[in-house]
Image (cartoon, rainbow, N blue to C red):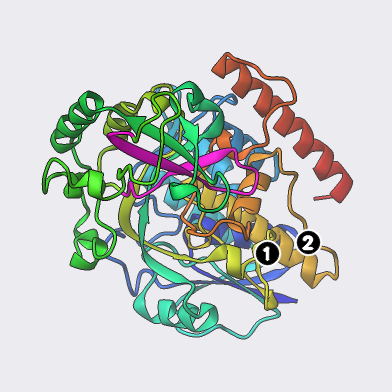
Amino acid sequence: MRAAVIGGGLAGVECAHALSRSGIQVDLYEQKPLNKSPAHKLDTLAELVCSNSLKAERLNSAAGLLKAEMAYLGSICVETAYECKVDAGGALAVDRFEFSRIITDKILADENITLIAKEITKLPKADGVVICAGPLASERISKTIRELCGEGLSFYDAAAPIVSAQSIDMSCAFVQSRYDRGGGDYINCPMNKEEYEAFYEAIITAESADVHSFDKRKDVYEGCMPIEVLASRGKDTMRYGPLKPVGLTDPRTGHRPWANLQLRKENRDGNMYNLVGFQTNLKFGEQKRVFSMFPALKNAEFVRCGVMHRNTFIDSPRLLNGDFSMKNNPLLFFGGQITGVEGYMESAASGLMAGLNLARRLRGEDTVILPEDTMIGALSRYISDGTVKNFQPMGANFGVLPPLSEKIRDKQLRYAELADRAMKSLEKAVAELSL
């Protein structure tokens, strides 16, 4: 049996490695060094384009838990990261050149993997294929992906922030749909005139994130204006846009709010809510500072900050199963950021699961989705959750996990308990499924 993996980034090498460990012969296609995107500089595999940090190392962090789960599943990326680790406080940071070199050497030394330096424009012939094209996929492979996915392919990620449901201060919020149409589908975060004016001054002076040269395209903002750009056009523009208060009554005052932010349920479980209409390019720290000025969000935990940048990804809830296979083609899988996971390790984890599951399918075994209380399992379910309407990429965070049966107020203790539960659940699943 022979599988083909398209893309030699973190997801691609993780996928190829997982297939190889399962005894599957792999053709790994990577367009470098013949062709490079504007962001890539190295000729080697698994290049870290932006930061050299793989985020927090401690287990009671979402990023740390994700890496611990991956390590337990035999991740080549986590293993290599510790081989070229550099001092970075509580983060797992690496020498990016050594990281890429070592992984490339491991792939080249693997007798089950054939590395082919070639830009793929059509699906290669194989018993199964995994597409791990990254966020800067070439135009030609993107065309092929578009043909496979129909309209379900996006080139720009314009996402509003998401907060955890349990961190919303409901004493300063109320549930109501505008004009009471439908059920109480929105959590409303009202502001009085004084609060709004302070918020307006804060947002028009907040600092925006730097934009890469390959992100500077006019169509990034068409039809999806950043909230800070809207605010800069006049003091009341937000009150006629995402913060319009019409059709709402604040039960605390009996009157319509001066301004109102609506929060919409992000997933089936209702443990995450997005800030409706708040696409933004503000720096992450600025988002938390400014958006926490809403009284209902003063203690909000930001599950994901808003982003606006080039990011090729598919409409996974409509196209993919939780095992990362296509719903209309069981032998075609996707891995990496193109599936709607966001981050180095998240991408690698999706590639790992795609590889494990393709190997199982080729052997005639059932594919697997890890338990929902593991970080990998929760992310797998998020990208395949058909109730997510306006799908946007998601990174590892504790908000995607089911809540604990017993409420723990201390955040660090709660995170530690979630991590402990996840690892025990993973260990049990691995033993039962013989992963």
Residue at mark 1 to residue at mark 2: CA–CA distance = 10 Å
| Quadrant of image for the N terminus | bottom right
Residue 368 at least partly seen: yes
* Nearer to me, 327 or 78: 327
* Quarter where residue 213 is shown: bottom left
Magenta span contains residue 212: no
Q: 187 left or right of 74? A: left
Residue at coordinates 75% horizontally, 44% vertically from top-left? Answer: 371
The structure residue drawn at horizontal position 56% and vertical position 64%, both measured from the top left corner, is 316
Residue positioned 85% across, 50% down in the render: 433
Taking 357 as reference, is 217 left or right? left
Sort mark 1 into few (<14), some (14-19) or many (20+) by Cα contacts within 10 Å: many
Snapshot quadrant of residue 236: top left
Mark 2, residue position: 367
Mark 1 secondary-structure assignment: loop
Residue 26 sits in quarter: bottom right
Tell me: residue 62, above or below residue 274. Answer: above
For label 2, the crowd category at 10 Å Cα-Cα, with few meaning under 14, some 14 to 19 and many 20 or more, is some
Q: Relative to 395, is 47 above or below?
A: below
Mark 1 or 2, closer to the camera: 1
- Position of 74 with respect to 170 (left or right) is right
The secondary structure type at the circle numbered 2 is loop
Disc 1 marks which residue?
A: 321
What residue is rendered at 73% in x and 20% in y? 406
Give the residues in magenta: 257-279
The tag on residue 418 is none
The first of marks 1 and 2 along the sequence is: 1
Amino acid type indicated by mark 1: Asn
